[in-house]
Amino acid sequence: MPQKKSLLNLLVLILLLVPAAIMAQVKNPVKWTYSAKKLSTGKYELHMTAIIEKGWHIYSQNTPDGGPVPTAFTFTKNPLVTLSGPVKETGKLESHFEKLFDVDVKQYSDKVDFVQTVTVKGNVKTNVAGKVEYMLCNDKECLPPKEVNFSIALQ
């Protein structure tokens, strides 16, 4: 009988924890979109756009050390594609002193467009793949840093 009670307690515990784990995974206050804009023959702008729910913010790539995790892009090597310069940020940059991190943080609310210029070698169709790492916070909590893979077609 003690074994059945122990098994029942374990089952109840699992049933209580599963919904909490599912809810924790569901919280994602940012939506990413990816697109390519052709500038000229073989030259494109890649747009990696974060649309952020009200009350949340994402951090600039230029957030200082000691602060929250800055947004960072890593591109998969493609011999047909050359990156031109760093990823640029377009949006309303906010800067303020954050007591939690004891640094001046740089962040975006609502929307930010990250833009990378690339050149394609030859007249071919290919794609640019990679991942973005980012962190989101609001005035009550910060979510753990997250990595998302992406792939953008160049035609």
Image: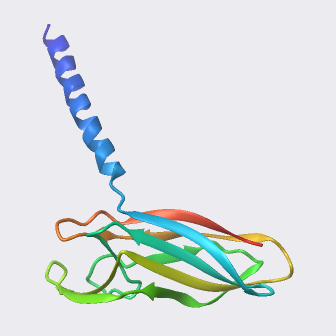
Determine the residue located farthest toward the bottom in the rendered image.
Answer: 85
Residue 139 or 133: which is nearer the viewer? 139
> In the image, is residue 34 above or below residue 97?
above
Point 23% across, 69% down: residue: 138
> In the image, is residue 44 above or below residue 53?
below
Residue 84 or 41: which is nearer the viewer? 41
Determine the residue located farthest toward the top in the rendered image.
Answer: 1
Point 67% across, 74% down: residue: 77
Tell me the quarter of the image containing the C terminus.
bottom right
Q: Quadrant of residue 79?
A: bottom right
Q: How many marks?
A: 0
In the picture, measured across the screen, residue 112 lies left or right of residue 9, that is right
Image colouring: rainbow
Instruction: Give the x, y percent position of residue 78.
Output: 71, 74
In the picture, measured across the screen, residue 108 lies left or right of residue 122, that is left
> In the image, is residue 64 above or below residue 132?
below
Q: Quadrant of residue 40?
A: bottom right
Instruction: Give the x, y percent position of residue 67.
Output: 26, 81
Instruction: Give the x, y percent position of residue 4.
Output: 19, 12
> In the image, is residue 78 above or below residue 88?
above
Q: Quadrant of residue 93?
A: bottom left
Point 71% across, 70% down: residue: 127
In the picture, measured across the screen, residue 73 lies left or right of residue 117, that is left
Point 47% across, 87% down: residue: 90
Tell me the quarter of the image containing the N terminus.
top left
